[in-house]
Amino acid sequence: MSSVSRILEQASEVPVPDPDAYRLIGMDTESLLAAACVRRDRAWGTTLTFSPKVFLPITNLCRNRCDYCSFRRSPGDPGEWTMSPEEIRAWLHRARDQGCIEALLCLGDTPETGFREYRELLRSWGHQRTVDYLRWAAEEALAVGLLPHTNAGILSRDDMIALRPVNVSLGLMLENVSDRLCAKGMPHHRAPDKRPARRIRMTREAGELQIPFTSGLLIGIGETIEERIDTILTIRRLHREYGHIGEVIVQNFRAHARTPMGNAPEPTSGELAQTIALARLLLDDEVSVQAPPNLNPASVPTLIRSGINDFGGISPVSPDYINPRHPWPYLDLLGEACAVEGFRLRPRLPVYPLHLDAPGFVDASLRPRIDQAQMELATP
Ligand code: SF4
């Protein structure tokens, strides 16, 4: 047996060790996908999951300017929006009525460091900092029976300590560990919060604080395949140190009009499939591998055949504000697509059994809400 065949055979059993990881690059995609599916099937069975969520874009103000982003605004821009307390409450109740479990609190990066108008708005609502407002919003979500998951970009250690008791998990896309993507002419040049060292540091601190954590890659923004593997291996190292990574999203860049990358080529479904398979073969089995179906409506069977076990959050009430031109799939159609591939589609919590069953990861005060949500999911 050639050494390449040996690596692939081992990959279908256990995560590929660091020295062999880059040798997966040259392998034919079909074999790679087949090995990833063996690993997925053994670890996650024949159930594919999603999280029924409401997406709350707390503010779209952001001090960064990523070249691919259509979400961010500055004060005074058309479409600038910071959700008022009344809007947040109304959306939470609507979400609860529609059977959502997760409240995803999402926003631009560190807006109060960039914009005086925003700081004044927060103060008029009785909050000094974004983290105070996020904490209030999460408490409101818990009060109506939703489980908060916050992805607020870069957070300090103290911010995460403040949010931990009112969130079942936090998230930050690592995106890519390549500093090259921050160089002049590259997509993160005008995004100080996308410096890989900052994002690695926050991911590490979340691990030290035992916070269940979502990470992920963004592919197709000028990175190489080696840099994708560097990124997956970085996430793996952090998870092996702290055990806190619940899921890794493999997200493909989609071009948005009126952005600097509006005409940039998007990654092919083959590239996406290869990266999903690499993530499945390199990450430990207990880490969920996820890809968003709304960004790949024609490729759902390919996502499944690449080794995902999860579709991420899908909302019956709110759009994907980051990708507003890409609506969520209808659940019955997604369920049918899963059935054709031999899988059943089921809703899940925004925190995984890995962390529910391990001591120290979920604040004790959240347990009753989690138990309640679990019961609701178990009731057909
Ligand atoms: S991708 Fe995130 S960090 Fe970058 S500009 Fe958009 S909102 Fe800001």
Image (cartoon, rainbow, N blue to C red):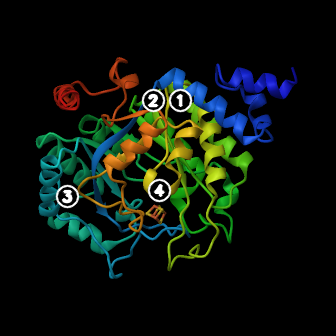
Which residue sits at x=66%, y=44%?
274
Residue 308 spot, x, y in % from top left: 52, 37
Amino acid under label 1? His
- In the image, which disc is placed on residue 244? 2
Q: Foreground mark, 3 or 1?
A: 1
Check disc 4: other Cα within 10 Å, few if <14, some if 14-19, many if 20+: some
Image marks 2 and 1: residues in contact by CB distance under 8 Å: yes
Q: Residues within 10 Å of mark 1 (few under 14, many from 20)?
A: many
Q: Tell me, yes or no, whether the two marked residues, 3 and 1, touch with CB atoms within 8 Å.
A: no
| Distance between the alpha carbons at the discs numbered 3 and 1 | 34 Å
Question: Residue 360: percent from the left, percent from the top?
Answer: 34, 21
Q: Which residue is mark 4?
A: 297
Residue indicated by mark 3: 127
Q: From the image, which quarter does the N terminus lie in? A: top right
Q: Which residue type does callout 4 highlight?
A: Pro
Rounded to the nearest whole Å, what is the CA distance between mark 4 and mark 2?
30 Å
Q: Please identify the quadrant where the C terminus is shown.
A: top left
Q: Which residue is found at the position 16% from the left and 63% from the top?
A: 87
Q: Residues within 10 Å of mark 3 (few under 14, many from 20)?
A: some
Disc 2 under 8 Å from ligand 1? The reply is: no
The label on residue 298 is none
Element on which disc 4 rests: helix
Quarter where residue 312 is shown: top left
What number of labels is visible? 4
The disc placed on residue 239 is 1
Mark 2: amino acid: His
Vertical position of residue 284 compared to residue 341: above or below: above
Q: CA distance from mark 4 to mark 3?
A: 40 Å
Q: Disc 2 or 3, which lies upstream in sequence?
A: 3
Q: Quadrant of residue 180?
A: bottom right
Among numbered discs 3 and 1, the one appearing first in the sequence: 3
Q: Is residue 124 above or below residue 9?
A: below
